[in-house]
Amino acid sequence: MITSGSIYETFHKAPECKDKDSSVASPLIKQNSIEKKDSYEVLKQIKRKLEKYDLKKELDLSSESIRILEDVNELEFNIFDLSRETNYNELVVLATYLMYKNDMFVNLTIEPKTFSIFIKSIQEGYNGVAYHNKVHGMDVGRLAYYYATS
């Protein structure tokens, strides 16, 4: 969950609660608590970091992974090819790629490293079931992106 310039991890069971349906959010990372006077400086810092950010290196992308990602704006995009090519790390790779491609790190003032920690925790939270899994979640997300940008 991203809110007010902070990223929070949502826990489905609070250790202090006996009710198994309780849900609490606790700070995963206190991301740039930005006051208006500091926002310009934060943006400059993130832009400087992004100038040095090597997406291929940071995500350990092969040339085939990059070729697959370049088709993200196509209806026929194959999430299963990306999944295999990224060693089943498709959610982290595609979410980070879309954030980078659309300048969302700058627009939302989120550092790529912070986003990486956040999105990895989401990917690791998915159950290994046959249908509602991380591949399906990212496929639905990518399709929503396709329709929103077409």
Image: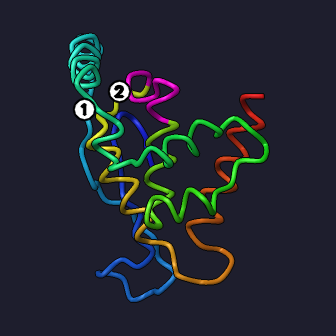
Say which quarter of the image contains residue 24: bottom left
Relative vertical location of residue 60 with respect to residue 55 in this rendering, above or below: below
Q: Which residue is mark 2?
A: 109
Q: Is label 1 in contact with label 2 (beta carbons under 8 Å)?
A: yes
Residue 84: x %, y % from top left? 53, 65
Residues at marks 1 and 2, CA–CA distance in whole angstroms: 8 Å
Q: Which residue is mark 1?
A: 32
In the drawing, does residue 81 fall left or right of residue 47?
A: right
Tell me the residue at 49%/41% (across/down).
66
Relative vertical location of residue 77 with respect to residue 122 in this rendering, above or below: above
- Crowding near pointer 2: few (<14 within 10 Å), some, many (20+)? many
Residue 122: x %, y % from top left? 44, 62
Tell me the residue at 45%/50% (across/down).
93
Tell me the residue at 52%/37% (across/down).
98
28 in magenta: no
The dominant secondary structure in magenta is helix
Tell me the residue at 40%/54% (across/down).
119
Which callout, 1 or 2, points to the residue nearer the camera?
2
Residue 12: x %, y % from top left? 45, 74
The number of discs equals 2
> Which amino acid lies under the numbered mark 2 shown in the image of this protein?
Thr
> Which amino acid lies under the numbered mark 1 shown in the image of this protein?
Asn
Say which quarter of the image contains residue 4: top left
Q: Quadrant of the C terminus?
A: top right
Along the line of sight, the residue nearer the viewer: 141 or 3? 141
Is label 2 in a helix, a strand or a loop?
A: loop
Magenta region: 99-107
Relative vertical location of residue 7 with respect to residue 21 in this rendering, above or below: above
Is label 1 in a helix, a strand or a loop?
A: loop
